[in-house]
Image (cartoon, rainbow, N blue to C red):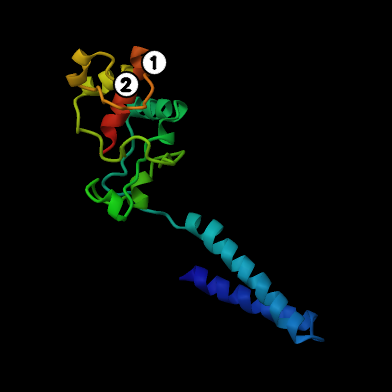
Amino acid sequence: MYTALILFILAGSIICLGGIYYKRSIVLGILVPGAMLLIIIAFLSTAVLPYMEKIPATDKGVPYSERALLGRQIYVREGCWYCHTQQVRPIRTDAGLGNVSQPGDYQYDYPHVLGTERTGPDLSHLGGKYEDDWHRNHLMNPRPKTPEEEGMAGKVKGSVMPPFSYLSREETEALVTYLQSLR
């Protein structure tokens, strides 16, 4: 409400000042201040205004436990967000993945790791879908190496995910805790 009022006052000021300064030509008196106004409004509406209002957290946007926060740091450090997304978009391809993501879902996420592409599955509602053992097994060796391993929990045939067997036990447990917190 107040932001619109400020923008109108700013717009009027720029047009009046431009008209006074360039009173010899209509083109310079209106078009130049108008172009300046357009640039300022575009900048304010895309870069400033979104950060001025507080977005309330949703039911999904809850603070992480200390262990889940460590797991999130490992998730970011290992670059998991390059292949996995954590957002359900309101488009046909995301139908069936769960509720559409809202800004309040990411109230406690910094940096935001929404993902860049979906080489791997979306993880936004992964928590509780599999047991902790499944996640541990999947992180250590996501691809089956022998025919006997094909039916084992955590083995995904055709997966391009690299194994994270080099993570310490504490790091693996923290990462599993973080993945289970994604609901």
Q: Which of the image's four quarters has the N terminus?
A: bottom left
For the C terminus, the image quarter is: top left
Circle 2 packing at 10 Å, graded few (<14), some (14-19), many (20+), is many
Task: Tell me what residue is drawn at x 68 percent, y 79 percent.
Answer: 15
Contact? badges 2 and 1 (CB < 8 Å):
yes
- Disc 2 versus disc 1: nearer the observer: 2
Name the residue beneath numbered marker 2: 139
Could you say which is closer to the camera, residue 118 or residue 103?
Answer: 118
Instruction: Tell me the residue at 21%/19% (across/down).
Output: 150
Query: Residue 125 or 83: which is nearer the viewer?
Result: 83
| Label 2 SS | helix
Determine the secondary structure under disc 1: loop
Locate residue 8, reporting x and y percent: 57, 76
Residue 128 is labelled as none
The quarter holding residue 35 reads bottom right
Considering only vertical position in the picture, is 118 above or below 130?
below
Horizontal side, residue 64 vs residue 152: left or right: right
Q: Can you give x and y, in whole percent of width and height, for residue 105 in the image?
A: 33, 46
Q: Please identify the quarter of the rendering in which residue 47 is found.
A: bottom right
Q: Amino acid at mark 1?
A: Leu
> As displayed, is residue 57 above or below residue 124?
below
Label 2 sits on what residue type?
Leu
Q: Position of residue 171 (x, y in %)?
A: 37, 18
- Which residue lies under the disc numbered 1? 167
> Residue 167 location, x and y as percent?
39, 15
Mark 1 crowdedness (10 Å alpha carbons): few <14, some 14-19, many ≥20: some
CA–CA distance between discs 2 and 1? 9 Å
